[in-house]
Amino acid sequence: MTKNIFINQKLPHDSAIKHVAGLAKYTDDIIEPYGTLHGAIGWSKEAHALIKKIDLKEVYKSEGVISVVASKDIPGRNDVGPVFDGDPIFPKSKVEYYGQPLFAVAATTTEFARKAVLKAKIIYKKLKPIVTINEALKKKKFVLKGRKIKRGNPLKKIKKAKNYLKNSFSLGSQEHFYLEGQIAFVIPQEDNDFKVYSSTQHPSETQQIIAKMLNQKNNSINVEVRRVGGGFGGKETQSFIFAAICTLLSKKTK
């Protein structure tokens, strides 16, 4: 007979013992097939700038490098925005944040890949960034077109109140802390299919975004998540770009 489980009864996490004992297997613990390549991303060193030139000649020549990918290598949609466009995998003409991916390499070791991306020569035309909310409001610069939902006249009602307070406050940003950071591991399959291991909260959307990037059917991409390693929403959408870049490298080196 099945034991009754009540709503407010405390239950252990399915993997609790593995977590505290250090036995839980994450994406980085998957046994790599012979010949697995390792990727590294070339990041933007500017927060807001036009891209005048990207010279990757020395990157291609770097020891251990097998392949290099950039925006020109994407056959389909160059965007990982799940709802709205505006989050390119590799920007073509403009960078919008420090550390934005510009290209990626696949090499025989992680060390070779990381050394190779440092050899890129990139020429920027710096633009003045907007770094505060007040400045963005003043210049009417918004990430997305605004949407206003209004019922009645709340400001008028507030001013008619016997007492009301008026002031402002600001909150600093926060960083997520994961047991396993953003990571992806891709194994090419038959018929141009790909098996993608991703530390993501949203495997089905990861599948759709990769399929659109490659201009392939959704069922050609199989996304598997063993454990997320901590999410908090940061792996809801931010994991997409790493899975996409890893798959693109896999396709080019297949």
Image (cartoon, rainbow, N blue to C red):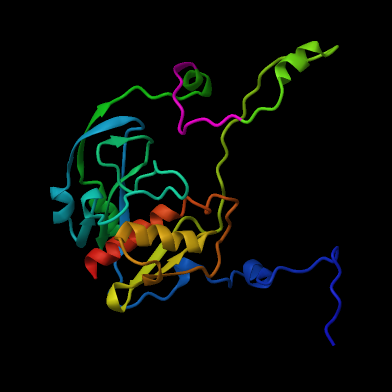
Count all numbered tags in the image, as a single digit.
0
Displayed quadrant of residue 246: bottom left
Q: Is residue 213 above or below residue 251?
A: above
- Report x, y in % for residue 40: 32, 55
Instruction: Choose between 196 and 60: the one closer to the eye.
Output: 196
Residue at the outermost front position:
152
| Image quadrant occupied by the C terminus | bottom left
Query: For this view, does 85 lie left or right of residue 45?
Result: right
Assign the magenta stretch its main secondary structure: loop
Residue at (86, 11) in percent of width and height: 162
Query: For this view, does 253 lie left or right of residue 18?
Result: left
Displayed quadrant of residue 50: top left
Question: Can I make out residue 108 in this image?
Answer: no
Residue at (47, 67) in percent of width and height: 27
**Residue 131 is a magenta residue:** no
Displayed quadrant of residue 167: top right
Q: Is residue 117 above or below residue 199?
A: above
Query: For this view, does 223 lie left or right of residue 59?
Result: right
Span colored in magenta: 138-148
Q: Is residue 1 above or below residue 33?
A: below
Instruction: Choose between 141 and 113: the one closer to the eye.
Output: 141
Instruction: Choose between 126 and 145: the one closer to the eye.
Output: 145
- Report x, y in % for residue 26: 51, 68
- Report x, y in % for residue 243: 40, 59
Q: Is residue 191 above or below residue 250?
A: below
Residue at (43, 55) in percent of width and height: 240
Residue at the outermost bottom position:
1
**Residue 144 is a magenta residue:** yes
Residue at (26, 61) in percent of width and height: 106
Question: Can I make out residue 38 in this image?
Answer: yes
